[in-house]
Amino acid sequence: MASQVATGPASSSMASSWTGLRRTESGYTQRAVASSTSFPSSSPARLPITSRHETRMLAVSVEKKFVTKKSEEVFTAAKELMPGGVNSPVRAFKSVGGQPIVFDRVKGCRAWDIDGNEYVDYVGTWGPAIIGHADDEVNAALVEALKKGTSFGAPCVLENELAEMVIEAVPSIEMVRFVNSGTEACMGMLRLVRAFTGREKIIKFEGCYHGHADSFLVKAGSGVATLGLPDSPGVPKAATSATLTASYNDLDGVKELFAKNKGEIAAVVLEPVVGNSGFIVPTKEFLEGIREITKADGALLVFDEVMTGFRLAYGGAQEYFGITPDLTTLGKIIGGGLPVGAYGGRKEIMQMVAPAGPMYQAGTLSGNPLAMTAGIMTLKRLQQQGTYEYLDNITGKLIAGLLEVGREAGHKLCGGHIRGMFGFFFTEGPVNNFGDAKKSDTEKFAKFHRGMLEKGVYFAPSQYEAGFTGLAHTEDDINFTISAAKEVFQSI
């Protein structure tokens, strides 16, 4: 069981041998020539060292100045066109301050903004880029699919292919319905659990985020937590009156809610690893206890695996922890970077969904050929030997290194990882729930975030968001990030 402690081996050599790195036109350089590092032995064969990685170890070249003039101009104009200048709140950088950067392009584990600054990216479009941005094989398949059309609004064989892959991979899923986003998946799931059980009440957890549907905007995480917003205006009381909340990892609190609402709770919905109020892992007793309680009461257990699905293991968090829910929501990775979502579970439950059953849910772009193609190609890559060992190796080294150099600089830090998902907080910890997460020094995180941005590392612009690694990240990228963090930690 992973804990809120770095689970990868600490490497003092990584931190000490890469002092004084600078971002340059040619890539990573340092003040003196250094010897090249290699991939961990567990890295997949499909990830060879290439010349573009080797050139980052060159001697000093002219340092490139961090400039955001074009980003500032575009964002200023955007604020007159879109609310807050963005189409999703966290992008506005409100919790970390400073000017948000405007992306121009991405490739592998890198992003470039419109001013030409280059970043090692640990956001990965909030999770989907697990095999790397703009993967050549995925793009080639998309080009071929594009020739046949972008949307049919009718069945296509690609839906069958991806459905079979998802059903084979995820322990709880016997049937699946594709939609267009994680929010839409959770909306469909919510209607389904109520239709199947004939009950209305649900239990969710403080700091967990299941999309922006009315019923879930109660003590929510993600952008709601990041911006410090109360329960959203515009949500009628009737929409949330049946939403009960508990503290994550508090099994007694869940038991108390069931005792007070016996026979009335349709489902318990949770992130099996929290990613929307920072990275928070469950205890074994918590997950096992909820599984037992829901079975005993006739309620359903739902894992929201929009973040964790195919990231913690090929079968998601439920495979990793060995706990099988009744329903699962998915997104992000199964679209390979294109808009997608899904919900699925036991056949007897899913057959309630129209047209097989009376619970209505529809979507014109659901199962569109582009998203299905990207998802199929991505999952094929994730099936290759060594994938999750590699993710665990590099992510463990990243979080261990960050904690080490941060603590050496005198900061209170805690953090951890599971496979390709990680997080850290500016507090001693441990962090077991959203209340603990709120003890983190968010002002210090904001300074850290800006310092790393200026050195060419892109972390999520919020203390309350998990980070992501992917197969395109190399050991060189990890070393560079830790060395940059060492300088930033010492400066804040």
Image (cartoon, rainbow, N blue to C red):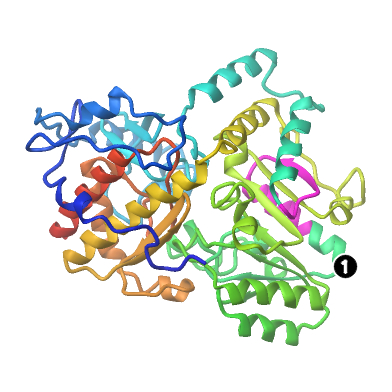
Q: Nearer the viewer, residue 176 or 87?
A: 176
Residues in magenta? Answer: 171-191
**Residue 53 sits in which quadrant?**
top left
Amino acid on which the number 1 mark rests in the picture:
Gly
Viewed as shown, does residue 124 lie left or right of 180? left
- The residue lying furthest to the top in this view is 147
Residue at 82% in and 55% down: 346
The residue under label 1 is 198
Location of residue 242 with respect to 449 vertically, above or below:
below
Residue at 38% in and 47% down: 394
Viewed as shown, does residue 380 lie left or right of 53? right
* Camera sees residue 4: yes
Q: Nearer the viewer, residue 297 or 394?
A: 394
**Residue 338 sits in which quadrant?**
top right
Let me know if residue 185 is in the magenta part: yes
Residue at 13% in and 36% down: 34
x and y percent of residue 474 in the render?
Answer: 35, 38
Q: Residues within 10 Å of mark 1 (few under 14, many from 20)?
A: few
The quadrant the C terminus occupies is bottom left
Location of residue 120 with respect to 192 vertically, above or below:
above
x and y percent of residue 464 in the render?
Answer: 42, 61
Viewed as shown, does residue 339 lie left or right of 426? right
Location of residue 353 with respect to 7 vertically, above or below:
above
Q: Nearer the viewer, residue 246 or 227?
A: 246
x and y percent of residue 473 in the render?
Answer: 38, 39
* Camera sees residue 264: no
> In the structure shown, which secondary structural element does the residue marked by tag 1 occupy?
loop
x and y percent of residue 308 in the render?
Answer: 56, 53
Let me know if residue 462 is in the magenta part: no
